[in-house]
Amino acid sequence: MYKVAMIGAGNVAWHLAPALEQCGHLVTTVYSRRLHHAEALCSRLYEARAVDSLDFSAVPADLFVLSVSDDALPQVIDRLILPEHPLTVVHTSGSRPLEILRVLEVPHGVFYPLQTFSKNKEVDWRRLPICVEGNTPQVEERLMQLARAVSGRVYQINSERRRYLHVAAVFACNFTNHMLALAEDLCEQYELDFEILHPLLAETFEKALRVGARQAQTGPAARGDVELIEQHLHLLSQDPDKQRIYRLLSESILNYQG
Amino acid sequence: MYKVAMIGAGNVAWHLAPALEQCGHLVTTVYSRRLHHAEALCSRLYEARAVDSLDFSAVPADLFVLSVSDDALPQVIDRLILPEHPLTVVHTSGSRPLEILRVLEVPHGVFYPLQTFSKNKEVDWRRLPICVEGNTPQVEERLMQLARAVSGRVYQINSERRRYLHVAAVFACNFTNHMLALAEDLCEQYELDFEILHPLLAETFEKALRVGARQAQTGPAARGDVELIEQHLHLLSQDPDKQRIYRLLSESILNYQG
């Protein structure tokens, strides 16, 4: 059993801290810059204490989980004061390397649950991928065990591959979402109900995951319908941003499918 | 009750013809350039006859449904010989205007089921949007009635708005799918299991439809994390196609969220 200090009380910590307690660990301390955030998370836990100081020298914990924003991570590490007894520190960031924790001179690792969390939405931890890395094989093995107790999908991924995984996630999630935003925008402009597209969208998405997106590609560019592409570019002539994106992505699909 | 001639036996006709029979209409004739395609569809229907000639002058039908590929549509219209009795012709294309049918000099319209169809996948017609247009209010009203018998989601959309709807569909479906293909590609290159991203993807998609994609946008560009964007661009330096897309879409998200 770990005694856990959660450093950060944001969306990840909000779901991860109770999940660790569900697996038999005990969260003793929750830090947030804003004490009432830490207190709110403590109210979901057995006996955790809320703190707003990064001096943990007297805190009863042997696992420190850094779960703050990517931006804040370097300065939190910088100001962190750890106790003298044996302990492990992990961060939960997908985009920051393991390396960033080395200055602490203690066993360290990454414990990255690959999901977007919202406080008001329950998380299905058994199906949620956790990517793990440790600074030694022993640390890594301990973190793998911890992750396997939380989730059925645990992956050992080093910092370099995790960086590419993060880029892939930007394409697969952030950019797909932006394409939806642009489509919403077009629908608004022409007084079309975006819901008309929902069934097509659901089918497209389902098919891409079932047969693979490359295999599932349809549309004017995939068919090489240059005339229709030109028509669409003309329709977008009042909207240079969408026009540029339409052109570049159509070219990319043409290249990619060719 | 319409007596229907299906012109084309591809994926749309494959599902639409039986759906029309379910609503009490009778498909009398199925045309395909390749007779065995027409015969395969006829085997799903009550008493339809397969033909491979576009001479319909003696065919017992009063609703002609042109359901061929966008490319083939103009030449099929050109060669079509219709009977002399009163009839209506519709096409099922999302990207072709109503206008294209005017040369036939009969009542005409568009009956566009907005979905991507596969022969081996059942279609839930009650939830499938159908976009309808007619060359006169009377034709349009008749087609609306027909569509309402098939689906619970019927929209009256003229050719100009349908063109923008089609552009929106390209963004929402073809381009999102291409983003997934690029993410798959990155995962392959770095020996990452694309399935790691599935739960995040499902959540992203579900959230975009629930709260709206613009509202749901996350990621480095949405946060304005210019440092991370630069790192990602650097990681993609061996792959100019993905790098260009990453740059353009990040700029677009920055503009769009700003």
Image (cartoon, coloured by chain):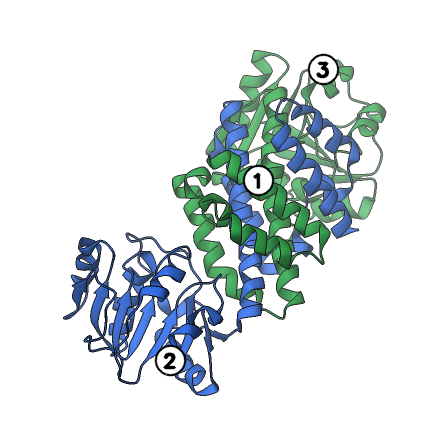
Chain colours: A green, B blue
Q: Which of these two is toward me, A76 or B189?
A: B189
Q: Chain of mark 2?
A: B
Q: Amino acid at mark 2?
A: Val
Q: Which residue position is annotated with label 3?
A: A106
Q: Amino acid at mark 1?
A: Glu
Residue under disc 1 on the same chain as residue under disc 2: no
Q: Nearer the viewer, mark 1 or mark 2?
A: 2
Residue B78 location in percent, x, y?
36, 65
Q: Amino acid at mark 3?
A: Val
Q: Is residue A94 above or below residue A244?
A: above
Q: Residues within 10 Å of mark 2 (few under 14, many from 20)?
A: some
Check whether the beta carbons of the residues at disc 3 and disc 1 lie within 8 A of each other.
no
Q: Chain of mark 3?
A: A
Q: Which residue position is annotated with label 2?
A: B106
Q: Residues within 10 Å of mark 3 (few under 14, many from 20)?
A: some
Residue A93 location in percent, x, y?
67, 31
> How far is mark 3 from mark 1, CA to CA?
50 Å
Q: Which residue position is annotated with label 1?
A: A251
Q: Quadrant of residue B219?
A: top right
> How far is mark 3 from mark 2, CA to CA?
82 Å
